[in-house]
């Protein structure tokens, strides 16, 4: 007798598959904990789609295959909310949040528990469910009337199309929350826009709003929007905001984990401050914290004023973007003569700091953004990040670098292949000042700042770094800001810097293209300044990380005025310390490149450690690199290492290599 396979009833199988997909979508998009591989998920999805194609009678609009393609006929129709979507009052500082707390306690007594939730900088949305099925999605609009965006919101995978019946909830209920654009997805979208030669999007919030209001739901689906839900109306058996959040979570909605129930306003303030510090760890932008009186009986007692509840407040963070106007575009001249455009703007507070100047990289960047004098611009500044112009209201390219150096009047040229413009006058006062400042900083001469340097240059006491070693106390006492003691201290500190390690000395010279790591490699390879300054281009190219361009620059430097400067420095008593030939050690013959931020050791210290153990630390990645140690923020070096299939270590793995 042959075994006969029992035929599976397609009507049963579709329901099984839909349930499986719902479970996997919930695990993946809501909990962030996928249970199956993408391939397995795709296989289940394909099977369901096949059955639905064969048996159109089994198809329903609530099938997971139907997220995209719902009827869009009534899209953007105006819809009236069942109850108005609230607007919150704002508190901008501690005094205002304390005043809120005082009003609350005056009305309902001393025992108040607050529910604190992150305020997502997204688009408020309302989802109406009827008999467990998503019936309608609407934007907030003016709070009373919004727009029907059902076809688009259905494509957001963390929005359940169907929810299990919850105890104590009526057939018709509404869930409210926020739709947002995850930052990583936003940055990816902008890279794609740039690659396609299209303008960048300004910020994730506006882009999320634009994505929800697309005519074609396929576009919305491609944007991978996310959601956080926080309101349930009616709230069923829930007795507090805290209960609501937990109920929503158990129904399968995505609810933000960063929430607390706090028994005092002091703790609310502390929690608010914690997220102000940590906001950049999040994959979404927040603009504050929503603070609600937790208990519903107390909320009821407090009631409303106009359309704002008296029991809730938005405790805001300083905005990280602001609009202002460009008043002037000036140029700053660096130590190598490179001109950097700086937009002077009408002072504006961004991220809690007053911004007056925004640096741009070069002429090309000014024109890509279309910045000009009088332009209205949006400035962004987040955390410790340098402020930047993210967009211009009416961009106009055509800004030109000056043809004369703004400081010395010398000729400004752009030498191919470099993108930068440079003042080529070797006696340029701006370059001289910056070179001296760089020398002082690298040689670790404390107290040699711009104010002092400007004075010694203006008085003709110092022209190049070798003159620093001839300064005496009597000369310095003449300067503004100096007394006998401080003058002597500076003389002593300069004198104390006269036996630098060779690598440090080379870096301090400011040889074009030679950074700290390259300077150390040159020092390690050539051992002494005498050997290095007489090296040929071929000799130089043999050094790890030194290409033909750099070899030519270094060679030209020592043949030209750089060689004279070295002679003068040696004559002034500076003795660069020869580096011992690299000896044997566990890292002998190995080259390391460090990139990104290291957590427990500075990059120079890590590089010094590698050299001590017999290895080399290089500044750039090549096929000759043995290890790339990458920390957070690693960029192009890491990408190159991946392309070359080099061994990439994190900080822990690097430390594991060190001898114990
Ligand atoms: Zn100049």
Image: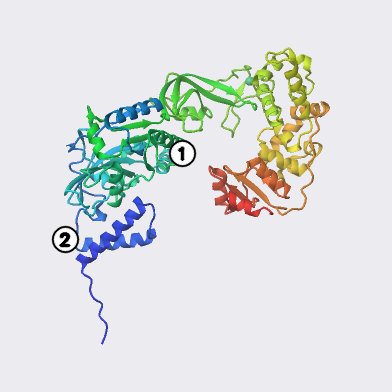
Q: Is residue 641 left or right of residue 294?
A: right
Q: Earlier in the sequence, mark 1 or mark 2?
A: 2
- Could one spot residue 376 in this view of the protein? no
Occupied quadrant, residue 552? top right
Q: Ligand 1 is found in which quarter of the picture?
A: top right
Residue under label 2: 57
> Residue at position x 37%, y 42% from top?
259
Residues under labels 1 and 2: Cα distance? Answer: 52 Å
Within-10-Å neighbours for mark 2: few <14, some 14–19, many 20+:
few
Above or below, 605 relative to 42: above
Occupied quadrant, residue 190? top left
Within-10-Å neighbours for mark 1: few <14, some 14–19, many 20+:
few
Above or below, 25 relative to 524: below
Q: Percent from the top left, x then y, of residue 396?
A: 42, 24
Quadrant that contains the N terminus: bottom left
In the image, which disc is placed on residue 440? none
Residue under label 1: 278
Nearest the eye: 248 or 168: 168
Q: Percent from the top left, x then y, of residue 306?
A: 22, 27
**Is ligand 1 within 8 Å of the beta carbon of the residue shown at mark 1?**
no
Occupied quadrant, residue 102? top left
Q: Is residue 269 left or right of residue 644?
A: left
């Amino acid at each position: 007798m042959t075994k006969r396979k029992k035929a599976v009833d397609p009507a049963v199988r579709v329901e099984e598959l839909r349930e499986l997909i719902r479970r996997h979508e919930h695990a993946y998009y809501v909990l962030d904990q996928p249970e199956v591989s993408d391939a397995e998920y795709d296989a289940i999805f394909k099977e369901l789609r096949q059955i639905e194609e064969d048996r159109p009678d089994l198809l329903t609009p609530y099938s997971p295959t139907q997220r995209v393609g719902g009827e869009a006929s009534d899209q953007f129709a105006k819809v009236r909310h069942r109850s108005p979507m609230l607007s919150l009052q704002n508190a901008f500082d501690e005094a205002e949040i304390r005043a809120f707390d005082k009003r609350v306690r005056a009305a309902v007594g001393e025992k108040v528990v607050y529910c604190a939730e992150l305020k997502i900088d997204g688009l408020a949305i309302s989802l109406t469910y009827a008999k467990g099925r998503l019936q309608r999605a609407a934007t907030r609009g003016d709070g009373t009337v919004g727009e029907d965006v059902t076809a688009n919101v259905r494509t957001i995978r963390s929005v359940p199309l169907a929810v299990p019946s919850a105890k104590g909830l009526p057939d018709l209920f509404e869930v409210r929350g926020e739709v947002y654009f995850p930052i990583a997805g936003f940055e990816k979208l902008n890279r794609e826009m740039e690659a396609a030669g299209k303008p960048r999007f300004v910020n994730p919030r506006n882009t999320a709003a634009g994505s929800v209001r697309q005519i074609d739901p396929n576009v919305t689906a491609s944007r991978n929007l996310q959601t956080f839900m926080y309101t349930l109306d009616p709230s069923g058996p829930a007795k507090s905001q805290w209960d609501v959040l937990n109920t929503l979570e158990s129904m399968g909605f995505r609810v933000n984990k960063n929430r607390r129930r706090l028994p005092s306003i002091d703790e609310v303030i502390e929690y608010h401050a914690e997220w102000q510090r940590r906001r950049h760890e999040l994959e979404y932008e927040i603009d504050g914290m929503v603070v609600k009186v937790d208990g519903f009986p107390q909320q009821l007692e407090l009631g409303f004023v106009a359309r704002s509840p008296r029991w809730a407040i938005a405790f805001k963070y300083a905005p990280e973007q602001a609009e202002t106007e460009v008043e002037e575009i000036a140029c700053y001249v660096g130590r190598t003569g490179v001109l950097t455009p700086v937009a002077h703007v009408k002072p504006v507070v961004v991220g809690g700091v007053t911004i007056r100047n925004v640096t741009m990289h070069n002429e090309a960047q000014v024109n890509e953004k279309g910045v000009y004098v009088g332009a209205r611009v949006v400035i962004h500044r987040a955390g410790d990040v340098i402020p930047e112009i993210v967009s211009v209201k009416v961009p106009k390219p055509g800004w030109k670098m000056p043809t004369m150096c703004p400081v010395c009047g010398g000729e400004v040229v752009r030498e191919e292949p470099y993108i930068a413009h440079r003042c080529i006058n070797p006696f340029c006062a701006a370059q001289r000042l910056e070179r001296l400042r760089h020398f002082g900083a690298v040689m670790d001469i404390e107290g040699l700042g711009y104010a002092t340097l400007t004075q010694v240059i203006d008085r003709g006491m110092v022209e190049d770094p070798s003159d620093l070693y001839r300064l005496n106390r009597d000369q310095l006492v003449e300067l503004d800001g100096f007394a006998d003691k401080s003058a002597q201290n500076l003389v002593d500190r300069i004198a104390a810097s006269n036996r630098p390690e060779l690598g440090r000395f080379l870096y301090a010279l400011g040889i074009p293209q030679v950074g700290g790591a390259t300077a150390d490699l040159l020092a390690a390879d050539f051992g002494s300044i005498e050997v290095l300054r007489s090296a040929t281009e071929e000799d130089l190219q043999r050094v790890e990380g030194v290409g033909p361009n750099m070899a030519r620059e270094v060679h030209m430097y020592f043949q030209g005025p750089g060689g004279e400067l070295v002679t003068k420095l040696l004559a002034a008593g500076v003795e660069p310390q020869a580096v011992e030939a690299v000896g044997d050690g566990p890292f002998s013959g190995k080259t390391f490149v460090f990139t990104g931020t290291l957590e427990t050791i500075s990059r120079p210290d890590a590089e010094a450690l590698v050299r001590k153990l017999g290895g080399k630390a290089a500044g750039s990645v090549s096929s000759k690199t043995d290890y790339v140690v990458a920390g957070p923020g690693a960029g192009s070096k890491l990408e190159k290492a991946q392309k070359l299939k080099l061994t990439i270590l994190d900080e822990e793995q690097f430390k594991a290599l060190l001898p114990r």
